[in-house]
């Protein structure tokens, strides 16, 4: 039974590692968007355009736990760790303080991963 527990933990860690890497792919897509739009970050409503306009390869940008496409939320506050489920990401622009800064948050099996490029 110890082998089963260790294998299960290793699988969870592997999925979370993939989710962190996918978060960085989203950051790259946002940076490409900004480069093509005079430095302006995408608005919440532009997030679907990242997929539609080729900034993100939707065939590869899927949650490793269930193979479904990530759901990217445009938000003004952080993901609630108590209600965070894998396959969810949040794009949180810091538009008030600095319109060129943002952070991404991804629901992992081990909690919320916060990424600031």
Image (spheres, helix red, strand yellow):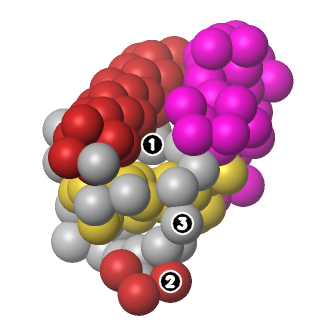
> Which SS class for mark 1?
loop
Compared with residue 83, is residue 85 higher up or lower down, i.e. above or below?
above
Q: Is residue 32 visible?
A: yes
Q: Position of residue 31 (x, y in %)?
A: 38, 26
Q: Residues within 10 Å of mark 1 (few under 14, many from 20)?
A: many
Please tell me whether residue 38 belongs to the stretch shown in magenta: no
Q: Residue at x 67, y 51 (%)?
A: 71
Disc number placed over residue 41 in the picture, else none: 1
Kindly check if marks 3 and 2 are in contact, taking CB atoms under 8 A apart as contact. yes
Looking at the rendering, the stretch of residues picked out in magenta corresponds to: 43-70
Compared with residue 57, is residue 83 higher up or lower down, i.e. above or below?
below
The quadrant where residue 62 appears: top right
Q: Nearer the viewer, residue 111 or 23?
A: 111
The quadrant where residue 50 appears: top right
Compared with residue 116, is residue 90 higher up or lower down, i.e. above or below?
below
Disc number placed over residue 83 in the picture, else none: 2
Q: CA distance from mark 3 to mark 2?
A: 7 Å
Q: CA distance from mark 2 to mark 1?
A: 27 Å
User: Which residue lies under the disc numbered 3?
Assistant: 85
> Which SS class for mark 3?
loop
Q: Is residue 16 visible?
A: no
Q: Mainly helix, strand or loop, the magenta region?
A: loop
Kindly check if marks 2 and 1 are in contact, taking CB atoms under 8 A apart as contact. no
Q: Residues within 10 Å of mark 2 (few under 14, many from 20)?
A: few
Disc tally is: 3
Q: Position of residue 103 (x, y in %)?
A: 29, 54
Q: Residue at x 21, y 71 (%)?
A: 97
Q: Position of residue 9 (x, y in %)?
A: 27, 45
Q: Position of residue 13 (x, y in %)?
A: 27, 39
Q: Residue at x 57, y 40 (%)?
A: 65
């Amino acid at each position: 039974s110890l082998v089963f527990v260790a294998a299960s933990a290793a699988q969870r860690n592997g999925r979370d590692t993939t989710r962190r890497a996918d978060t960085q792919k989203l950051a790259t897509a946002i940076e490409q968007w900004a480069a093509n739009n005079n430095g302006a970050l995408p608005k919440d409503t532009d997030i679907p355009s990242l997929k539609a306009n080729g900034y993100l390869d939707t065939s590869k940008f899927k949650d490793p736990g269930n193979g479904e496409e990530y759901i990217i939320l445009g938000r003004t506050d952080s993901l609630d760790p108590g209600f965070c489920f894998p396959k969810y990401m949040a794009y949180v622009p810091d538009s008030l303080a600095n319109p060129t800064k943002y952070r991404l948050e991804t629901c992992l099996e081990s909690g919320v991963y916060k990424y600031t490029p």
